[in-house]
Image (cartoon, grey):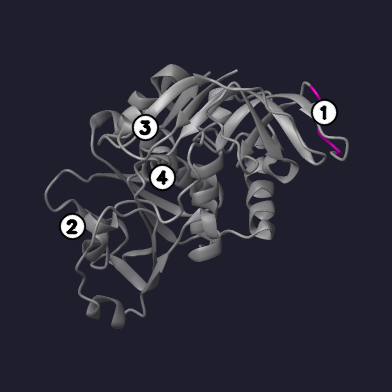
Amino acid sequence: MKAIVVREFGSPEVLKLEDVPDPSPGPRQVLVRVKAVGVNPVDTYIRSGMYARKPTLPYTPGTDIAGVVERVGPEVAGIGTGDRVYAHGVAAGHGGSAELTVCEQPQVHALPPRLSFPQGAAIGVPYGTAWRALFMRAHARPGEAVLVHGGSGGVGVACIQIARAHGLRVIATAGTDQGLALVREQGAHDVLNHRQAGYLDQLLPMTAGQGVDVVLEMLANVNLDRDLDVIAPRARVVVIGSRGRVEIDARKTMGKDGAILGMTLFNASAEELHEIHAGIGAGLENGTLAPVVGREFPLAEAARAHAAVMEPGAFGKIVLIP
């Protein structure tokens, strides 16, 4: 089969398309014929060698896939050959950027017929991150106001859809006309252009001077200190992404009992992941959740996809098609 193989950490050019042996599933594993694989910013950090968790070289990147079950191990129940599935995660020693991959059974979930395979590949990290940030870190509640900072990317779209479906007041930012239109379409009650000077000055009037109860922050090194100017009493700021150091005035949190919370999906327990995907699955089935795919690249152009996912002006999810 064809697969992307990384033999050294570095720039996107280290992503090479190679012929490798077909994998086989173990007793409790599922072999999936991959129809689409999601590209996440964390994939680029790992590939560069700068991430805290480094895979053993050589490796095949990609953990968010969608496809059709090719074969299952003898101890697998409830999943059969021919099933349409998405997976968040792959078995150790395997990768999603390939024509075939192996997943552990708990990583595999049903993909509703209403969703395409590229949409299925846009679920795992973005929607899992959004769910964990909103409900397991921020403990968001219906009626609260949430600021989704960077709402036009894969995680941002997921945050908007999930928050709106659970009764939160959603304010989202984007940096292009296309991105602003997207976050409106996805259900944001109010939209701000984060490339305009002083754009957060508009937020307090939107909330009757109270500020927001939850901030979902995708670029903390740029925005965190300014976020603290627009939080409500007892607000929670969840840091989902950051690309450098940041200086804040901690006094801004004191008078409001504000909290800054870090988060990574890697820290989710098996029990949390089960809860997350049960909730996501219900939204996928009833139509309140629908991933947006911005760009598709053939598997051979994985390097272009890794470069594109880090460019400004995000619009939905980037996926590779084997």
| Mark 1 neighbour class, 10 Å CA radius: few under 14, some 14 to 19, many 20 or more | some
Q: Distance between the residues labelled 4 and 2?
A: 37 Å
Look at 34% across and 34% down and name the residue there. Answer: 309
- Amino acid type for the residue under numbered disc 2: Asp
**Residue farthest along the bottom direction in this orientation:** 255
Look at 26% across and 62% down and name the residue there. Answer: 224
Q: What residue did someone put label 3 on?
A: 182
Q: Which secondary structure class fits the magenta region best?
A: loop
| Residue 198 picture location, percent across and down | 13, 53
- Amino acid type for the residue under numbered disc 4: Ile
Mark 1 or 2: the one toward you: 1
- Amino acid type for the residue under numbered disc 3: Leu
- Left or right: residue 110 compared with residue 264: right
Dot 3 or dot 1, earlier in sequence = 1
Look at 60% across and 42% down and name the residue there. Answer: 89
Q: Distance between the residues labelled 1 and 2?
A: 54 Å
Is 53 or 21 nearer to us in this picture? 21
The residue stretch that appears in magenta:
77-81
| Residue 67 picture location, percent across and down | 64, 24
Instruction: Tell me the number on the disc at residue 80.
Output: 1
Dot 4 or dot 1, earlier in sequence = 4
Mark 3 or 2: the one toward you: 3
Is 317 or 51 nearer to us in this picture? 51
Look at 58% across and 22% down and name the residue there. Answer: 20
